[in-house]
Image (cartoon, rainbow, N blue to C red):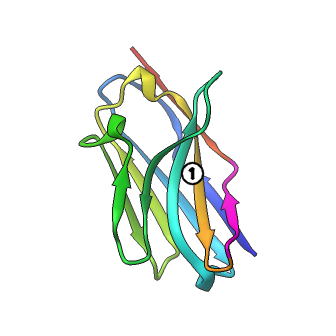
C-alpha cells in the first residue's frame, strides 16, 4: 500500500504563486506515474499535470506555461509549482499515484483559493 500526504495549499491573490507537495510512503517501489488533479465546486475532477518515473511530463492546456510538476524518486515526492495563479485555478488539489500493480492512490486533497 502507498500512502500520500499533501501540503502547501492556501489562499493567494491573482498573479501569486503556491507550491504543493505530496510525499509518498509505504510500497513506494511500486510507484509509476505521479500526478496532480483538481476539482472545483460543481465540476468534475480533472488532470492538472503528471510525471512518469522517467521524468516525462504532461500538462492540462489551461496550466501550460504557468505550472510546473517535478518529482524526486529518491524522496518519493512530487511537487506542483503554480505561478501566475488565476481565480479559475481555485479548487481542491489532489495528489495521485499509479502503481505497477495497476492500483491508484489519492491524497486527502488540499484547498487552493485564488482571489481576484
The residue located at (36%, 25%) in the rendering is 86
Please tell me whether residue 97 is drawn above or below residue 94 in the rendered image. below
35 relative to 56 in the view: left or right: right
Q: Determine the image quadrant of residue 65.
A: top left
Q: Does the magenta-highlighted stretch encompass residue 110? A: no
Picture coordinates of residue 53 (x, y %)?
44, 76
Picture coordinates of residue 48 (x, y %)?
45, 45
Q: Determine the image quadrant of residue 98.
A: bottom right
Front-most of residues 39 and 103: 103
Please tell me whether residue 89 is drawn above or below residue 59 in the rendered image. above
- Residue lying furthest left: 65
Please tell me whether residue 40 is drawn above or below residue 31 in the rendered image. above
**CA neighbours of label 1 inside 10 A, class few (<14), some (14 to 19), many (20+):** some
In the image, which residues are magenta?
102-108
- Residue lying furthest top: 116
Q: Does the magenta-highlighted stretch encompass residue 105? A: yes
Front-most of residues 54 and 116: 54
**Quarter that holds the N terminus:** bottom right
Picture coordinates of residue 45 (x, y %)?
60, 38
- Residue lying furthest right: 1
**Quarter that holds the C terminus:** top left
Please tell me whether residue 12 is drawn above or below residue 75 in the rendered image. above
Q: Provide the secondary structure element on which disc 1 rests.
A: strand
The residue located at (34%, 68%) in the rendering is 56
Front-most of residues 90 and 44: 44
Picture coordinates of residue 57 (x, y %)?
35, 61
The residue located at (55%, 31%) in the rendering is 91
The residue located at (62%, 82%) in the rendering is 30
34 relative to 71 in the view: left or right: right
Front-most of residues 104 and 22: 104
16 relative to 53 in the view: left or right: left
Residue with the mark numbered 1: 7
Amino acid at each position: 500500500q502507498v500512502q500520500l500526504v499533501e501540503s502547501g495549499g492556501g489562499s493567494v491573490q491573482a498573479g501569486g504563486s503556491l507550491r504543493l507537495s505530496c510525499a509518498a510512503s509505504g510500497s513506494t517501489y511500486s510507484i509509476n506515474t505521479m500526478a496532480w488533479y483538481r476539482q472545483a465546486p460543481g465540476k468534475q475532477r480533472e488532470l492538472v499535470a503528471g510525471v512518469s518515473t522517467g521524468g516525462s511530463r504532461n500538462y492540462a492546456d489551461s496550466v501550460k506555461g504557468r505550472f510546473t510538476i517535478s518529482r524526486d524518486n529518491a524522496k518519493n515526492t512530487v511537487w506542483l509549482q503554480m505561478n501566475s495563479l488565476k481565480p479559475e485555478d481555485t479548487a481542491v488539489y489532489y495528489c495521485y499515484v499509479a502503481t505497477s500493480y495497476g492500483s491508484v492512490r489519492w491524497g486527502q486533497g488540499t484547498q487552493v483559493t485564488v482571489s481576484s
